[in-house]
Image: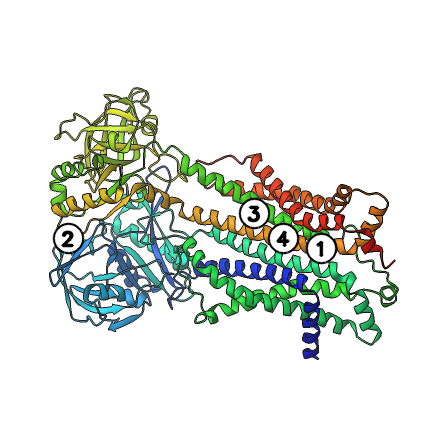
């Protein structure tokens, strides 16, 4: 019987090739789009889940309560984690990871290697985390003093092979290290990504002192709790222990939180000094799931609409089957088999489309998904699940709809199938409503990204090359190096600074104390601090609003500062020039004089308000110089080559690391850029699939009314009136879809834009453009079949009457 069902289904498809093509293409696109998006969602939600203790691992978060708003840090005292293991039965083990700034330079057989992606950790690291080992003993690898574990890639880079156990690498600052383990490269879905792990038992007195200090903050700490432990209860106990050890004053300033390992990827964006190199966005996960659902629903609705519209042409077939003894169950099964067959063929087509699309999708999402015959088994559950869902969504309603025909009526030729408010029309409206929501969202997202790209940040970020300073010799001789950098052809100016815009998570923060004359009080305000030299205006293009910059300031004078407008307003200084304030940082204080005010500039992303900022002179003790910023023009490749030559002259131990500042700032909006493109692709696919179905419906509508059109032409109807007759119904449905979609799109985009402090207003233009675009595309889709019908000879359509 099953074989017979499929045989009939194949014959039916062979007789209706156009119908089959439209359905297969629409369903294949829906499956492909959903597969790509759900692959991304699956990867994002799988972060850190490969660890066997993933459900029991938590990270310690320190909450700073001293400012206007609490700030959360992923670092704490190294001794805290080990103390909790000793005193709390709910904590079974712990490990710490310390990420030191800058490079660790290694020398191997006279060849120097600059290493940035490294951590200092303890022997318990591989007890807490399940990173795979290739060589060595994971239990004892980091127990030896001055031992290191290398990743597979790094072992090959250093030694040309993973067979590197027992070999040594040398650091000019930390001495000689022995390789005691080789681990597999860290998985892409891990928030911890390392190339080198250094045992914390290495010979550095300052480091050893920090391991036992409650005052010094440094590493990230992870705890393994007992199964079923109440995180909130453990958190309270941990806070009590910390307060007891640190004393009451410190307890008044900080709180502690325990963050589940599964939350780190999605909830690290606003946690400072987190070792997570990337962070996920739950709102985008929901958006991508929604787009995947939209595509599946739109493709399924296509099938339902086309299947039910074709019912009038299969009515006699159904009637004859009933006459010869077919029961409802058999008819329903027959139509479900047709739906399943079309969906299975669509699945095969979608596998090819997914394979072709995956490289583009990887570029878009900065992932490395592998879709090939070798990995097809990993995707089969998702593909088969989508196929089953689509087959059921597409097949159930048409099956029951077509089996409701009364045998006597259909054999007489009476084929009433629906009322003016049939489900088919509702489904068409729903299809286009979903498409319109996506088009409106795409337009608004594009407008916001254009706004971000065009917004005046308060400085000129174009053609700025930022060079890291990773050597004490360079810091000591920065003036000589700055002079030589300025002499490179194409270089317009050079400035040194402690930080640069775009590095807001690591920008120094200090406390400014001002005298409030009106209230006769001393007000303390936490502000951001960046140190510059006298070339900051020329290099960055900051706009001086009042006073003077550092040009002409005595090189030995560290007491001159500039404020941004927000800082001046925060301090309540109407005429700040010449006023003095006191800066405090890490127990040190310095009274400084305000010599100028610069216009506000966005050193953070546009998700954040401009915060109070103090710009100090380079020799201010609040910060050390870490960057050269070079303003250049002309051939940038030649300029960078010249800068590299100068750098290597002053720093022979470290390879030059540089980047363009505008690229660094663009990283703030990488997730939004990705979402923007996915919106565009999703909107394009959804409208395309919807129009495929609309084309099929138009074709069957024309076929159903061909005799009516012939009679109208005989009676004198014009081609225009016939075109209007055929197109107006679809136009009304698209217009109604627009009315329904608009408030939903407005609500979705309003919530999305609320994540930006600086954003565009939702304009009626976005809705007008989306509505007109959808209407024009829909009418163009319908017009081809409608125009052919209006030009046909009425004799051909009425010949059989």
Q: Going by the image, does 420 lie left or right of 155?
A: right
Q: Which residue is mark 3?
A: 438
Dot 4, crowdedness within 10 Å: few (<14), some or many (≥20)?
many
First in sequence, mark 4 or 2: give its number.
2
Q: Quadrant of the N terminus?
A: bottom right
Task: Mark 4 and mark 2 in contact? Answer it, CB < 8 Å.
Answer: no
Nearer the observer: mark 3 or 2; the answer is 3
Residue position for label 4? 690
Tell me whether circle 3 and circle 2 mark residues in contact (CB < 8 Å).
no
- Horizontal side of residue 204 vs 717, given as left or right: left
Left or right of 746? Residue 184 is left
Residue 731 vs 266, above or below: the answer is above
**Residue at 23% across / 26% down in the picture?**
549
x, y percent for residue 171: 14, 58
Which of the pair 799/478 is nearer the observer?
Answer: 799
| Among the two numbered marks 3 and 4 on one chain, the one whose residue lies closer to the N terminus | 3
Task: Answer with mark 3 or mark 1, whichever residue precedes in sequence.
Answer: 3
Nearest to the eye among marks 4 and 2: give it: 4
Q: Quadrant of residue 483?
A: top left
Q: Which residue is mark 1?
A: 699
Q: Between marks 1 and 4, how big is the CA–CA gap?
A: 14 Å
Q: Residues within 10 Å of mark 1 (few under 14, many from 20)?
A: many
């Amino acid at each position: 019987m099953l074989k017979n069902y499929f045989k009939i289904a194949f014959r039916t498809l062979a007789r209706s090739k156009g119908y089959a093509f439209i359905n297969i293409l629409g369903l294949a696109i829906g499956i492909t789009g959903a597969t790509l998006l759900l692959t991304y969602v699956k990867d994002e939600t799988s972060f850190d889940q490969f660890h066997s203790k993933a459900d029991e691992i938590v990270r310690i978060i320190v909450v700073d309560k001293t400012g206007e708003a609490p700030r959360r840090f992923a670092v704490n005292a190294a001794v805290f984690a080990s103390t909790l293991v000793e005193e709390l039965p709910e904590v079974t083990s712990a490990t710490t990871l310390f990420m030191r700034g800058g490079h660790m330079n290694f020398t191997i057989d006279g060849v120097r290697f600059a290493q940035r992606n490294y951590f200092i950790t303890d022997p318990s690291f591989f007890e807490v985390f399940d990173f795979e080992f290739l060589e060595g003993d994971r239990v004892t690898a980091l127990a030896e003093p001055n031992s290191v574990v290398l990743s597979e890639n790094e072992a090959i880079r250093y030694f040309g092979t993973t067979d590197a156990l027992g070999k040594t690498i040398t650091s000019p600052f930390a001495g000689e290290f022995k390789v005691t383990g080789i681990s597999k490269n860290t998985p892409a879905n891990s928030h911890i990504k390392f190339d080198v792990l250094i045992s914390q038992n290495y010979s550095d007195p300052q480091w050893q002192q920090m391991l036992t200090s409650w005052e010094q903050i440094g590493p990230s700490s992870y705890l393994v709790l007992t199964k079923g432990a109440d995180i909130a209860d453990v958190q309270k106990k941990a806070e009590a222990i910390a307060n007891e050890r640190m004393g009451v004053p410190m307890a008044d300033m900080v709180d502690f939180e325990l963050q589940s390992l599964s939350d780190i990827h999605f909830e690290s964006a606003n946690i400072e000094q987190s070792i997570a190199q990337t962070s996920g966005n739950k709102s985008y996960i929901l958006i991508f799931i929604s787009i995947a659902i939209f595509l599946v629903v739109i493709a399924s609705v296509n099938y339902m609409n086309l299947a039910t519209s074709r019912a009038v042409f299969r009515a006699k077939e159904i009637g004859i089957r009933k006459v010869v003894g077919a029961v409802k169950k058999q008819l329903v099964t027959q139509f479900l088999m047709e739906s399943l067959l079309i969906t299975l063929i669509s699945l095969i087509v979608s596998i090819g489309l997914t394979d072709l699309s995956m490289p583009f999708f990887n570029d878009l999402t900065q992932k490395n998904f592998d879709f090939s015959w070798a990995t097809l088994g990993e995707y089969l559950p998702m593909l088969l699940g989508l196929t089953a869902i689509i087959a059921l969504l597409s097949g159930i309603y048409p099956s029951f709809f077509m089996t409701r025909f009364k045998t006597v009526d259909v054999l007489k030729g009476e084929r009433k199938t629906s009322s003016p408010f049939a489900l088919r029309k509702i489904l068409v409206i729903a299809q286009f409503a979903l498409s319109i929501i996506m088009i409106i969202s795409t337009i608004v997202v594009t407008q916001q990204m254009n706004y971000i790209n065009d917004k005046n940040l308060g400085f000129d970020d174009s053609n700025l090359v930022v060079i890291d300073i990773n050597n004490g010799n360079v810091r000591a001789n920065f003036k000589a190096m700055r002079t030589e950098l300025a002499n490179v052809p194409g270089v317009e100016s050079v400035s040194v600074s402690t930080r640069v815009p775009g590095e807001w998570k690591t920008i120094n923060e200090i406390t400014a104390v001002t005298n409030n004359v009106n209230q006769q009080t001393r007000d303390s305000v936490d502000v951001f601090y960046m140190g510059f030299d006298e070339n900051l205006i020329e290099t960055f293009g900051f706009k001086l609003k009042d006073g003077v910059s550092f040009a002409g300031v005595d090189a030995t004078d560290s007491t001159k500062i500039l404020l941004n407008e927000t800082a001046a307003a925060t301090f309540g200084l109407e005429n700040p020039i010449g006023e003095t304030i006191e800066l405090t940082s890490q127990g040190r204080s310095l009274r400084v004089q305000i010599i100028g005010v610069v216009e506000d500039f966005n050193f953070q992303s546009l998700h954040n308000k401009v915060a109070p900022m103090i710009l100090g002179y380079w020799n201010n003790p609040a910060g050390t110089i870490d960057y050269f910023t070079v303003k250049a023009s002309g051939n940038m490749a030649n300029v960078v080559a010249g800068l590299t030559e100068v750098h290597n002259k002053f720093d022979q131990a470290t390879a030059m690391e540089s980047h363009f500042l505008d690229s660094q700032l663009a990283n703030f909006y990488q997730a939004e850029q990705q979402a923007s493109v996915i919106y565009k692709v999703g909107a394009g696919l959804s409208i395309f699939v919807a129009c495929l179905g609309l084309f099929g419906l138009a074709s069957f509508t024309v076929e159903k009314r061909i005799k009516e059109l012939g009679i109208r032409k005989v009676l004198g109807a014009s081609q225009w009136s016939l075109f209007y007759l055929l197109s107006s119904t679809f136009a009304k449905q698209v217009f109604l879809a627009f009315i329904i979609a608009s408030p939903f799109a407005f609500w979705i985009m309003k919530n999305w834009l609320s994540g930006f402090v600086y954003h565009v207003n939702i304009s009626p233009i976005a809705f007008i453009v989306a509505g007109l675009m959808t209407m024009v595309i829909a009418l163009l889709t319908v017009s081809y079949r409608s125009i052919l019908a209006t030009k046909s000879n009425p004799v051909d359509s009425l010949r059989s009457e």
